[in-house]
Amino acid sequence: AHTPRVFSGVQPTGKLTLGNYLGAVKRFDELQGSGMETIYCVVDMHAITQWQDPAELTRATRLVTASFLACGLDPKRSILFNQSAVPGHAELAWILSCVIRIGWLNRMTQFKDKAGKNREAASAGLYTYPALMAADILLYKATHVPVGDDQKQHLELARDTAAKFNLDYGAPGGAADFFPLPEPLIEGTVTRVMSLRDGSKKMSKSDPSDMSRINLTDDADTIAQKIRKAKTDPEPLPETAEGLAERPEARNLVGIFAALTGRGVADVLGEFAGQGFSAFKPALAEVAVSVLAPIGAEMARLMDDPAEIDRVLADGAARARAVSEPLLEETRRLVGF
Ligand code: ADP
Ligand code: NA
């Protein structure tokens, strides 16, 4: 049996949003108390699959680390580091890119979304991104991966990759289950927070419109204004969750309220059924500010001392290397290196 171990990552491509918080980082924090080892990574090598300004990348890496810490991730209880500081990610990604089939990559919807119409002009790294993501997880033989719903397909590919490696290189009587098949942990009241401007798109830090998202660093007035301007419909809130089925914007806002307060959707509707958004939105803004304001304040405090953030990352990288190096050495041996 494999040691239960959690791995997940966030790209340093901007400020974290409420979507990253509810879909990922809040869950990372909760898993620190699960008894499983927890390893959380700022995936700067993933970020450069689309060009990043170098100075901005360095700053964003610190900012995501500051968000991790401000959201409760504890360097004593978790390994916190940045991907490029552990060269094993790149080495294993190469080995796995020789296990993964091109046909698997061709099915990835995120590549199609991010590459847009001119696929020939996308970087090769954007295309092979799932190989690096599989390497991130398997380098630590992680068994559980908390992610938002948008990463489900990539995680399935990581499982297929682990299974094919085990088949290709599992010596008879030996390593048939060398890599565990990592389990996705896609849980919580909202696993996909939607854009405030368009209920059919996910809230993303890379969306060109800042009004589409709430950033962890937004101040109280900005949060209130974004929620006030969020797209909704003219109907009052329904009695039950089924009444939200055809109302994506309303469903999203109610889901956010429920996730932020730790209440069920039915319970929230019990309080607000029959009321319109002119009543619901200010209540949601208040809840959002009460959760996010302390996180934003702590991030600002941490960003005043970048050397301390770098120290946390360097310490985490040393520990990540200590866990992964013996596993990578075994992998190399199985391949025949
Ligand atoms: P983004 O998509 O905002 O650029 P990343 O790709 O770095 O963020 O994703 C970091 C984590 O946040 C992943 O686990 C991803 O599934 C999760 N995540 C991102 N956006 C959302 C969202 N709108 N709702 C829920 N989870 C999300
Ligand atoms: Na994403």
Image (tube, rainbow, N blue to C red):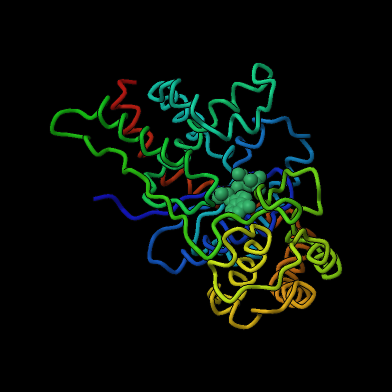
Relative to 69, residue 281 above or below = below
Residue drawn at x 54%, y 69% is 241
The percent position of residue 298, horizontal first and vertical second, equals 73, 68
The percent position of residue 325, horizontal first and vertical second, equals 41, 39
Specify the farthest residue to the left: 173
Residue drawn at x 82%, y 66% is 228
Q: Which of the 4 image quadrants contains residue 294?
A: bottom right
Residue toward you, 287 or 199: 199
> Can the viewer see residue 314 in this picture?
no
Specify the farthest residue to the top: 120
> Can the viewer see residue 220 in this picture?
yes
The percent position of residue 101, horizontal first and vertical second, equals 41, 22
**152 relative to 123 in the view: left or right:** left
**42 relative to 290 in the view: left or right:** left
Quadrant in the picture for the C terminus: top left
Residue drawn at x 53%, y 38% is 86
Relative to 15, residue 45 above or below = above
Question: How many labels sit on residues?
Answer: 0
The percent position of residue 299, horizontal first and vertical second, equals 73, 63
Q: Which of the 4 image quadrants contains residue 43?
A: top right
Residue drawn at x 51%, y 50% is 8
Relative to 328, residue 102 above or below = above
Relative to 324, residue 37 above or below = below
Residue toward you, 302 or 213: 213
Residue toward you, 80 or 243: 243
